[in-house]
Image (tube, rainbow, N blue to C red):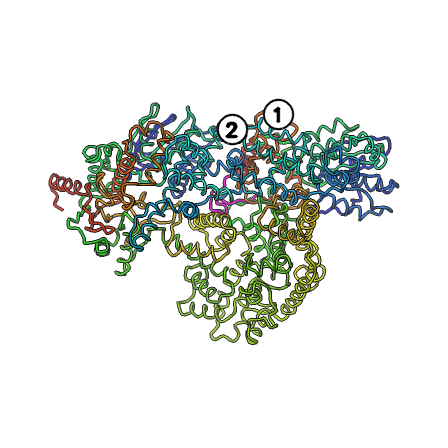
Amino acid sequence: MSSETTLWGYRLRPQQREVLQYTGGRMAVSAVPGSGKTLTLALLAAKLIVEGRIDEDAEVLVVTVQNSAVDNIAQRIRDILDRQRIPPLGFRVCTLHKLASDILRARYDLAGVEEQFVIIDDNETRRLMQSAVDVWVAEHIGWWQSFIPETDVTRQQRMKEAWRRETQRVGLEITKLCKHLRLSPKEARDLLDRANRPFEFLRMGIELYAQYDRYLQAQSGLDFDDLIWRALEALDQDETFLLNLRRRWPYVLEDEAQDSSPLQEMILERLVGPEGNWVRVGDPNQSINSTFTAADPRYFRRFLRQQGVKPLSLLISGRCARPIMFLANRLVRWTCLHHPEPAVREMAFQLQEMFPTEEGDAQPNPPDTQSHIYFHTEPFPDIKEEARQVAHWAVSHLKRYPDYSVAILCPTNQQGSEVVSALQNLGASYDDLLRSTPRVREVARVLSATFGYLGDVLSTTKLGSLYQLLATAGFLQKSRGMERLRHRVALIRSLSTHDFLFPQTGNSLREALAMAPRVEEEDLRCLAEFSSLVSKWVRASFLPVDQLLLTVAQDLFTDSVDLALCHTMAVSLRAVSQMHPSWRLPDFAAELEAVARNRRALIGMSLADAGYTPQPGKIAVTTMHKAKGLEWDTVFLLSVDNLEFPSSLDDTFRGELYFLSGRAPAVEARKELERLSGGIVPGFLEEEVSDPIAQARLEFVAERLRLLYVGITRARRNLSFTWSEVNSRRRVEPARALRVLREAYQDYLESSGRVN
Amino acid sequence: MRGQELLSLPLKLTREQQKVVEWPREGGQSLFLSGLPGTGKSTALMARLAALLRVGYRPYEILVFLPQRAQVVRYEQVLASLDAPIRGGVDCLTFYSFAKRSVALFWPRIASVLGFAHPEREPTFLTLETAQYYMWRIVEPLIRAEGYFSSLKIRRERLLSQLIDNLNKAALVGFDYKEVYSRLKGAWTGSLERLHSYWQAQDCITRFREYCLAHNLVDFSLSVEAFQYLWKREDYQQYFRTRYHHLLVDNLEENVPVALDFIRWALEQIDGSSILAYDLAGGHRIFLGADARYAAEFANYCDCALECRDLVRPAGAPLAFAGAVRRALGLSPLVGETAFQEAVRAQYRGKYWVNMLDWVVERISQLVHEEGVSPREIAVIAPYVSEVLRFALEDGLARKGISMHLLRPSRPLRDDPIVRALLTWVILGHPAWREALEKGEYLLPVEDVALALQVALADLDPIRARRLARAAFPREMRRLIDLDGQESLLTPEERGHLWEEVGYQIRRRYKALLLWLEDAQQRDSEGVDIFLSRFFGSLLSTPGFGFYDQPERARVYGRLVESAAKFREAVRISSELDQDTLVREYVRLVLDGIASGEYVVDWPTFFATDAVLLSPAYAYLTRDLASHYQFWVDLGSDGWWNRPNQPLTHPYVLSRHWPVGRPWRDIEEERSRKEALGNVVLGLAARCTGGIFLVSSELGVDGTEQDGRFQRAIVRAMRMASNEQ
């Protein structure tokens, strides 16, 4: 079957066929963007089931990073099985976090947690670490302030704020690293004491970790790293538990393997066992989360080279037009062979290139003739001007190509905000995806309005606004025109909320509104519907906050993406309420409002999870980081300069505090701890340069190159690069890579006979 | 029993029941009666009890032993309905209440032997809450100063309940509490770190026990241990033999090992007759220490064994269905599997959770309104009843004009809004609190005051309650004020408007409330229980107030008052705290969630007369209910499969059947869960006389995929059946 070019109606590329030959053992598939790795994984899972390799009680376990991929893969497998007239059993698709929390839920006792544990998200993690920093700084104020040079008050204030942020960063990074090293605060402290070295930043980090851990401990909270750590603990406590799970999941297929952190990798390693079947698919060149999640491309690359692992590649991609592919390949090649920092040559990329599809491919590359690359040679004076101009181009571009999807990708949120306001000024149609998606904000808006009212039940204004919101958003019967809607809002506001929601016995809405002008039957019907819904929520408002949210959600939403969003918000609020027992409804409404008003991201979700798909005729604004996994016809990459994409140790590095004169507390603390503990993975430390700050900078240079690679490969047809002379009040140069790419592209055009 | 609630005895008995009634009444003969649920064992016992009374045995000679309070109530109801001349005076008791009573009776003789520091003084029996209070006083400094339990993620209330659970398990199973550590250690397969936690747990309970002995405090475990010692004494044997001549035990399988030891001992003492009923599909209270395996051995200890085979309740098809599901789980079916399809009245698998719920509401409405089924004949059974489920179902059914009754294991006091409201009244009204409140030492949110008003005043909806609270509890005054008096901040016009909105009836009631509180201010400081009892008796239970004709609410009230009274009694005796401090400590104890473990001792339940029952499976089974129609909902949920494992205790390892030193592995875990689920299925089916509705949704209430083990077993059972056909 697998030697054929199609399988169940899917046309296969030769490399996909090779992957689908798999029947067992360890295999690593290194894939390039757009090579159809998720489809291949789904086909492989279905094939293992169809071929009868999965016993009745067992399942193929497919692990992904994003929830949206879970749905996508599961649906594909179900469809295939359905067409083969096989019951939809024998597979389980989930994210790694879900897997970990299911392991905990199966055996709380082994994991040492109670069943009421709450998972706190990164927002709450930051909030708790902030409190830990406040406590710690107050106790060590003399030492802490000694890092601030004498200068005028305003500047000192600014420095203090920056130093406080850096202190928080030390806390967060040491906490994360300790968890990856599976060190409790006490063990970390013992390690440091044994070393008998001052390591003052590390000591501060460990103390912050201890304080943060106490906060979590008091309320049985787990952060994302704890979740994985505890699950791993549970697996290590009872071999038969592990064996049972191994029997249940004889095959483990992993998507986006490059993003798995060492702890996550360890969980899967345990589940698979030494003799087990494990297929890891990933793109080592798209690993861009290493500084935040301890995922590091080295881990997956190491696996690719491991003995006993069959390495395969999926290098054929139909996503981008050839010129874009050329640029992506050139970036990889130049970095691996010619990057000015020799260490980066090893660190940044796996030397692998993308290849265009053959004729007759199901997803052929867009024709070269439709592809345009634009290097803006002259810098803009500043990023504001750059944003304004790019916004203008994007709008004009859409006028010419109304069916194209367009994205403006920025290295930072700040730059993104500039673009958003420029688009706003132009009256353009755009999706602001910097922190969340319009869908997330819409759901949060509805919930925050509901909670806002429930926290202030006497307010007729809020009740009227809630009606307006629910009616315009389609949750209630549609009104005939805005005027009718406004009229109904006025009717609601004319009554006190208790008369509207809890009329005294015998009184009906009709009687209550008897004196009101122009009340039609339909108005009464609509208002009665609204009244019964809201009065139910008011009666439910003594429920725990997450349960109240879910009660409201069940009344309003039916779509699984919306429900999943509501669930994410409910879980987050439950954690918040457990961590802050004195909070009441208005506080929770404010939390939701922060998401609704785009002041806060909904953590732990990709744009696709949060219900975003690129739309033709619309401009998306987001960061290069968030754009991962998505593609647009036309992509504008902004601020491609040597601040955002440094190439040498002498460049300026974001986040390093100038007044600390050569010290980098978070980096130093992290590297000191790695060295004391021998590092997460044996052998990696030996590859590093001895100066920790230099090493951290090199890692940063490498990661930013991968980020650029991700940015480039988001484009199907058109790609534009721009930069500004001044970025973050610093004078900057174009990124080294940008110059290289431009020159290479000139050669490409000349050699292919095209003129840009 | 529900649906057909057994309040009086049937006119006609089965052959086996007749045998039980006619069992020899003299000579100390014992009978072991077994059977599946629905074979009429309880009825047989009750008929036997009635027969004994009718022929003139004196009630106090008869001891009826039951595993939980709910059944005690049932027996008492039947006794009340008997036409026997002397019906009162029969001792219907649970093991614990019997033990406690005996210990209290023999206290002077045993106290010093047991090691109490002041045998000459009266003992103080601790409730779960007071035990938690004392345990917290012991554990808290150890956590703070010594870093106890730092490797675990457990909130303090959970920690306390597990520590106390370990002590109780030791007592109920009958091993020395000092062995808790070695038993848990012997079964642990993992890292050394957990052993530290076990050791710390042992240390805490040892300190707790020492504290109890030094202060004459008798917790649950000490009562049981003392009783174990007591019944071996000559003087107690003498007493028992003289007092009791007949023994009836229902649901033997739900008893803990020590209770079974006692029953075994009692069999030898009884010179009249003993009859023990054993449910073949029981043993659900395993987390409370029930030992069905040991109970089964009583077939050998009794003079005769009799199995009831005829079903009194027609549960044939549901039982066959349960058998098929058990087989699909890889268990022995235990019952015949013929033609089970008719047991399943309908199946539904919706996409969303809300679809599932709508479907259930629709079908119940059809049953009630079109088929004339009484709502009390219908039970909705879920693995776990969340607030969303409760609220949504209650609301959906109310729209169809059907009421719903919720049965769930007692929950932490703090989680009950009625309790929170009542404690707000203590804060508002008790002199011990009022000062702290007015000085701003305690911040009471206006939302809490609104809830308190809503609960106290009848016919006050949440919005009017909030309106009233906002006016009556001005932030700057920090107390309730007379809105028509001088301190009112409202203009006459605003005042008129307020009462117009909230209602003049409410105005009168509010005034009465305020007067009562003013009066309470003038009194000497009194305990929370006394304060609340007076509040209830003189005001809240009268017409126009929130507890008038509200038995459910009154029950919660009663529970709070009892808890407060026991706290006062227990803490006052053994510490130096004054009355006001006691009041404040108690309120904090509940609100901070320290006293929040679920009750080990369950409480009788009052059923609304004609309502659909919503219940978690476990509560339904342990209350021994039955319904004509059962809706098994959320079938895809993992809740049917996962048990509430806890890191510091273990129901199986701390049992008699687990040899010390043998590791508890996942193989055993898996087997025990399978058996537990198999028993649940069998137990439910045996309690269903009409048909089962199987209901699930692809996505759970939280939007996650629902594909649990129970759902899969049912699918497989169905598939196996259709393949066989």
Helix, strand or loop for disc 1? loop
Circle 1 Cα neighbour tier, 10 Å, few/some/many (<14 / 14–19 / ≥20): some
- Name which residue type carries label 1: Val
How far is the residue under mark 1 from the one under mark 2?
A: 18 Å
Q: Is residue B259 left or right of residue A599?
A: right
Q: Is residue B446 above or below residue B128?
A: below
Q: Chain of mark 1?
A: B
Residue B617 visible to the viewer: yes
Q: Nearer the viewer, residue A140 or A219?
A: A140
Q: Chain of mark 2?
A: B
**Predominant secondary structure in magenta?**
loop
Is B705 in the magenta?
yes
Q: Is residue A574 left or right of residue B543?
A: left
Helix, strand or loop for disc 2? helix
Q: Earlier in the sequence, mark 1 or mark 2?
A: 2
Q: How many marks?
A: 2
Residue A394 visible to the viewer: no
Front label number (1 vs 2): 2
Give the x, y percent position of residue A516. 49, 74
Which residue is under mark 2?
B192
Which residue is under mark 1?
B660
Q: Nearer the viewer, residue A663 or A70?
A: A663
Q: Which residues are magenta?
A: B694-707
Q: Is residue A113 above or below residue B512?
A: above
The N terminus of chain A, quarter of image: top left
